Amino acid sequence: MACALARMGERTVARRALTKAREGWHAPHVDDQADMDWATALTEMYLDRTDVAERLVSNAVGRWNDSHDRRQAVPGRITLAQLHVQAGDSRGVELAARATNEVRELRPTRAHRPRVDAIKARARAKVSGPRAHRPPNVVNP
């Protein structure tokens, strides 16, 4: 709910909802902690706290890398690439390419493909120059 509120511009209510969701919550499994970190990262991203979002999504991807379910890491890698591209970080192109490769490897995640393609296009535009053929804003699930 916090993520949806943040996307609607309800910053104060979103922060309150995020605090309430995380307060006293303990992950029963490492994958659950990664899921919570990713959901929190999306909320923080929409609250324009990209440094916090990047740290959280990096933690989530790291946890998912250690798990047996690689599929979970795909949305996290997409989000990580998006954050780096939006920040103009040169690693954004590499991260977008890695996310694209993972989407290809895991066919059931096709739903994420349009988002990855948009991130790659944005990364190429940043490399080729300011405002050059930028795609519309990327939207998270």
Image: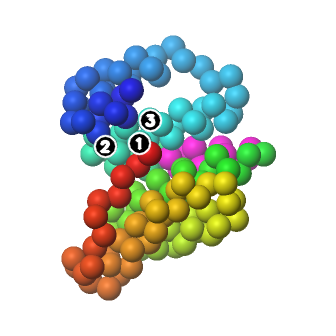
Tell me the quadrant of the picture where the N terminus can be found: top left
**Direction from residue 3 to residue 103 in the image, left or right:** right
Most extreme residue toward the bottom, as rendered? 128
Q: Are marks 1 and 3 in contact (CB under 8 Å)?
A: yes
- Mark 2 vs 1: CB contact within 8 A: yes
Q: Position of residue 23 (x, y in %)?
A: 46, 17
Q: Is 46 colored magenta in this rendering?
A: no
Residue under numbered circle 1: 42
| Residue ID at (65%, 67%) | 104
Amino acid type at image mark 3: Thr
Does dot 2 land on a helix, a strand or a loop? helix
> Looking at the image, which residue is at 28% across and 73% down?
134
For marks 3 and 2, the one nearer the N-term is: 3
Image height of 57 relative to 124, above or below: above
Left or right relative to 12: residue 54: right
Tell me the amino acid under the disc marked 2. Tyr
Q: Which residue is mark 3?
A: 40
Helix, strand or loop at mark 1:
helix
31 relative to 51 in the view: left or right = right
| Distance from Cα at disc 3 to Cα at disc 2 | 10 Å
Residue bounds of the magenta highlight: 57-67
Amino acid type at image mark 1: Leu
Q: How far is mark 1 from mark 3, CA to CA? A: 5 Å
Residue 118 shows in the view: yes
Can you say whether 18 is above or below 95 in the image? above
The kind of secondary structure the magenta stretch mainly shows is helix
The residue pinned by badge 2 equals 46
